[in-house]
Image (cartoon, rainbow, N blue to C red):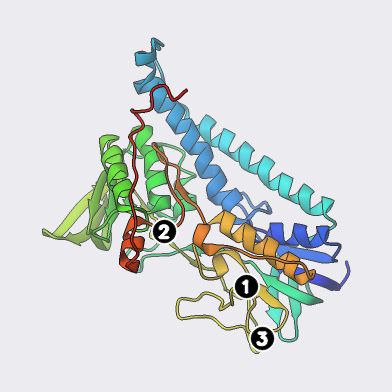
Amino acid sequence: MSDQYDVIVIGAGPAGYPCAIRAGQNKLKVACIDEWQNHDGSYAFGGTCLNAGCIPSKALLESSELYHRAHAEFAVHGIKLTGVSFDVAAMQKRKAQIVKQSTAGIASLLKGAGVTALVGHGKLLPGNKVEFTDKDGNKQELTAKHVVLASGSVPTELKSLPFDGKDVVDSWGALEFDAVPKRLGVIGAGVIGLELGSVWRRLGAEVVVLEAMDAFLPMADKAVANEALKHLKKQGLDIRLGAKVSGADKTKDGVVVKYTDAKGEQTVTVDKVVVAIGRRPFTKNLLADGTGVELDERGFVKVDHECRTAVPNVWAVGDLVRGPMLAHKGKEEGVVVADLIAGLHGHVNYDLVPSVIYTAPEIAWVGQTEEQVKASGRAYKVGSFPFIGPGNTG
């Protein structure tokens, strides 16, 4: 293995691997380092998105939606089914196969672009050097003209309700349930909480969603958020806003979650709790002393509008930096950085990053909301049209 490269990318998630591939396509000598390890001990590229986020969650969303439609909606189409049931193990097997195929595809793409894929941990050292520790613990010092930090993010833990991997889990744990919980508590009514809550509600769980904020989906247009809330409640999600969780007790009857809302102190008893209050940048053992790379007060790596850190030729992209924690945003940043390194033009328009929540119905938006435009003081017009109206637009 060489110890000198044009570009070393630390992280092979949706921001890191596109960066490495584009840099390879730009005829640069590239290495991409990643240490993702699955529960079975296997290593895989693709980061959280492919292994424990976007891809597996969409697989379960599709499986659970098909079951729900067969059980509750097919009859109106004249499709009569009897004895409709589901097999969680089969659903999980399909999900695992999709993840395996996706991550194997990343390894093939890296190889095709001439990228050296290194399994292990990467740590930035002063002077644009990288300490690479392989999966057996062997260390090697690598050098590069450019280093791109793309180590991603991890779930945020509630101090009052720490993960135990069994009864209180993060989003990855909620994707691995081997049976449908009778009662499921979800802390956080954001993208992750609503998607995971939808999966297990469709399969029969009683789902309570506790959201600390008084507003539902405040990042979306208010009219869209209000309509989505009506649909989700109709589907059986018990969404409680302004509910601030203070802790939980494990009892023989389940996990008793304590929270406070406008009515005062409350409790709800569930069998499993999913904490989905957001994610934080993953910088553990990423930066050695003296690198000069700066973090802000929230732990994000400080970068300019082109993802340059304060250190020449050290870049950072994806969930590690400011902006929405979205795979496609990270991918665009990674490609742009690879082009800038190669002396080409690159630009990300952060005002036009789309957002989607894959519930039913799906919730999506792009650009500013009406509330943001109104706050800016600009004159504007609102247009809306019900889906029921078009009928025949031909």
Tell me which amino acid carries mark 1: Cys
Q: Which is closer to the viewer, label 3 or label 1?
A: 1
- 1 and 191: which is toward the camera: 191
C-alpha span from label 3 to label 2: 37 Å
Badge 3 or badge 2: first in the primary sequence? 3
C-alpha span from label 1 to label 2: 23 Å
Q: Secondary structure at mark 2?
A: loop
Badge 1 or badge 2: first in the primary sequence? 1
Badge 3 or badge 1: first in the primary sequence? 3
C-alpha span from label 3 to label 1: 17 Å
Disc 2: which residue: 368
Disc 1: which residue: 307
Disc 3: which residue: 291
Residue 83 has which mark?
A: none
Query: Looking at the picture, how far across and down is residue 331, in whole percent?
Result: 63, 57
Taking the image as shown, residue 59 lies to the left or right of residue 392, namely: right
Tell me which amino acid carries mark 3: Thr
- 341 and 12: which is toward the camera: 341
